[in-house]
Image (cartoon, rainbow, N blue to C red):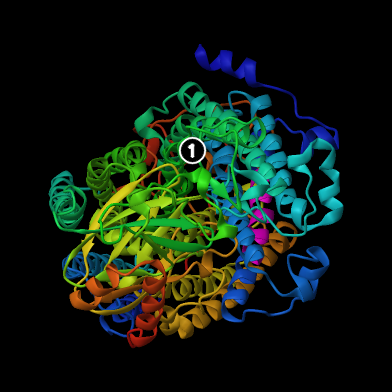
Amino acid sequence: MGRLLAIAIWVITILSVWMFVSGKWWFPESISEHGSRVDSQFLITILVVGISFAAAQIGLGWTVWKFRDNASAQRATYSHGNNRLEVVWSIVTALVFISLAVMGQRVWASLHLHAAPPGSLQVEVVAQQFSWNFHYAGKDNVFGRTDPNLIDDSALNFVGLDETDPNAKDDAVVATLVIPANRPVELILRSKDVTHSFFVPQLRFKQDLVPGMNIHVHFTATKVGKYELACAELCGMNHYKMKSYMLVLPENEFSELATMPQDKFQARKDELLNKYQLPNY
Amino acid sequence: MAEATHAEVHRHPAPTGFIRKYIFSLDHKVIGIQYILLALSAVVVGMIMSVLMRVNLSWPGTQIKIMETLFPQGAPGGAMTPEFYLSLVTMHGTIMVFFVLTTAPQGGFGNYFLPLQIGAEDMAFPFLNMMSFWVTFVGFVVLLLAIFAEGNATIGSWFSKLGESFAGGSGTVGPIGGWTGYTPLSALGKIAGPGQGAGVNLWIISIAIFCVGSLLGALNFITTLLNMRTRGMSLMRMPLTCWAWFTTAVLALLSFPVLLAGGILLMLDRMAGTSFFIPGGLYVSGSLVPLHNGGSPLLWQHLFWFFGHPEVYIAIVPGMGATSHIISTFARKPIFGYRAMVFAIFAIGMLGFFVWGHHMFMSGMSPYSAIAFSILTLSIGVPSAIKTFNWIGTLWGAKIRFTTPMLFAIGFVSLFVAGGITGLVLGQTSLDFFFHDTYFVTAHFHLVMGVASIFGMFAATYFWFPKMFGRMMNEGWGKIHFWITFIGVYAIFIPFHAMGLLGMPRRYARFDEYEFLKHSHPLVLFVTIAAIITVIAQLLFYFNLFWSMFKGQKATDNPWEATTLEWTTATPPPHDNFAGILPVVHRGPYEFSVPGAPKDFIMQTEPEGTGISADLGGTSGNGGNGHRG
């Protein structure tokens, strides 16, 4: 029974490790400036995790293989432990784990402990059950006034834009996030109703949109293309299809679009959405 | 003379009537079995729900006749709607976390064996003990009603007299909110969409009731352990199981009040127009939400996770205790580093109160506090690693007897490592950009707090069954049960990591809306098949359990040749546990293979000096048939 158990533990260990190293199931391609740093931090972490996992399982397997009851008169070793080993082991794991923890803050700190760089494109994101609205400031770079009292979904005023505000004249509100490549983007995240979460796997980025809060985040996308945007916080019955796209455009294509008035913006955006294809999965 | 006083206070005659003996019993042993039966029932409901969810994920639109009978609109034609799926997610999580993982390990085995292992005649407050079980039982009934209140018109109509917000029977199944019930989705009531009405009310009430039951239990455990240990049972001579139950009780005492308060505030938001969790200016389902202003959705998350993280340890710590105890017994070796084990278990429990924010990295909370929470989180890896190291250390140089309980205890160690170690990934803020709320998280917590805890309880069941019922469970079936379950749970939950790597979000009723999830279909199918096989294999366990109660081979008083006090008394133990003569403890709990001793184990009651003579007399037989595997 001991040998069988040891073999089972080892086979499970090998299969588990294989699942990670086979490359069959891995992150989608990274398309953001910080994405490759997330990926390399994950690689370091999964290496530590994999080695610790394998070492513990191999060790466990070894003890059940080796120290099974063999019906000899010889008794088990009488020992209450070893304090020195215990201390050394604790210090080693503490050093490894705390180092990982500190390293694991770097990407986070670079994105979240600094304001968006000057010259970032600002987009207001307003989530609702079960769709996304993206509010662009237009040519004047000033967002028109919004007010929850003005929200009227049936009149298609999804974000409560005040049409009487002069700053609102050139604003556009669309259902797709369109951003330029290689230029920092600042999102101002809001929710109209319940908590949602902005998640684009390729972007290596996620942030909840919380009612009552304006959450400012920023990132830089580096690869032109069309990517799926998913909601990652349970928001009600159609959570699983609260889907949109993030379109990353070359700078020239984007600046042409960004200066268009609302109706043309909308039409051109739809054209571009058809022009670009999703990545090959 | 403290012992004598206790004895008088707690000695109550054995009841004779059926109701006082088996239903409203004050005997901790009966109450323990009641808790275990509650968990055994709840886990069946939870497992059936998980199979239904898997079937829906792999074969959307599958028609199951009985679902239509129960929920005419939630499953039209017997096919599951997305909101039905979400209510199963909610119910599965709530049932498993509260009514399985919190009841069996602590209320069940803790109740039965803590007094026996410390040499007490009962718990400190037998009446509170009875109350805590029955309160918990009511909580379970209310929770079951939650899914029917909206989904089934007949049951819905029962509640309509309680006011508009309780009027159920809308047809859509609820509650929909996950076991975490994030606000404002859970706070807004019916306007927030289908499944947010009466079902959510009952869900909150059920949890509040459960909190009360757990608090009563926690008070009882702490008092009993501190005041009622028999002569010679110093803290550092207690079995590690007792340390685990004590730590768990402290966690429960400090965390459940916070959830209870949160639940009451949430109910007030729903019923009384308060705004603890609802900010102003919300626009929900086509209209502005009047009357609410100034609340904070994050407040709920803080309250919930201040409870929720310690809750994870409430689920697994008793499993750690049982595993330590069982591994030492069947390794025929003293536990490696007893003191370190005690400190580690307490450290895990206490650190557990400072890490709740790692559930909230993406919530909009301050990024600075996220960093603090992250570093504290990874530091929990240190006491966890100490425990793993010591379990393997205990096995090193052992003479392992591969009984069924030992197999499950070794399985616990393996699963605890497999599930716990991915905490190093998920505890890092930078990696949560990707992994938060993906299947990687689902993999992590199912392995560590779900199946590892359950393995601890399987080990405990096979181990203590002979003491509880006077008969052995069938070893052959037990082993088959172990092998299918051990391989099965890995087959289910290891592929979850791969889905997480693809970015698959949790709590999705279907995966076919997204191209980036296309890859996952074979994995999803594989998991579903593994889950169905593993669930069916549990029938073996149930059959073994109930068959052995009546037909199992008769057990001796100490069949495993173990050392602690529960094995010194009769089988099953008499009403007052030790037939009026409390045992006196002379040594630590894990004296196995002591050189020069006549047998390879020395009971805790064996006096020093005479202890290693041939006379191993106790209150009852210490012999045993060995059960070498």
Q: Residue at x 27, y 45 (%)?
A: B370
Amino acid carrying label 1: it is Pro
Residue drawn at (62%, 76%) of the image: B55
Q: How many marks?
A: 1
Compared to B375, does A276 lie above or below? below
The chain letter under disc 1 is B
- The residue at the point 42 percent across, 40 percent down is B298
Describe the element under mark 1 as helix, strand or loop: loop
Is B47 drawn above or below residue B159 in the view shown? Answer: below
Q: Position of residue B125 (x, y in %)?
A: 62, 23
**B38 inside magenta stretch:** yes
Point out residue A276 in the picture as x, y percentages from the top left corner.
Answer: 33, 85
Q: Is residue B557 magenta?
A: no
Q: Magenta residues: mostly which secondary structure?
A: helix
Q: Nearer the viewer, residue A71 or A269?
A: A269
Q: Along the horizontal axis of the image, is A114 left or right of A271?
A: left
Mark 1 residue crowding within 10 angstroms, few (<14) / some (14–19) / many (20+)? many
Percent position (x, y) of residue B330?
Answer: 42, 57
Do we see residue B430 in this rendering? yes
Q: Residue at horizontal 42%, vertical 64%?
A: B411
Q: Which residues are the magenta region?
A: B33-48
B458 lies left or right of B194: left
Q: Along the line of sight, which residue is nearer the eye, A137 or B531? A: A137
Q: Quadrant of residue B589?
A: top left
Residue underneath mark 1: B279
- Where's residue B456, x and y in %? 48, 55
- Along the line of sight, the residue nearer the viewer: A267 or A19: A267
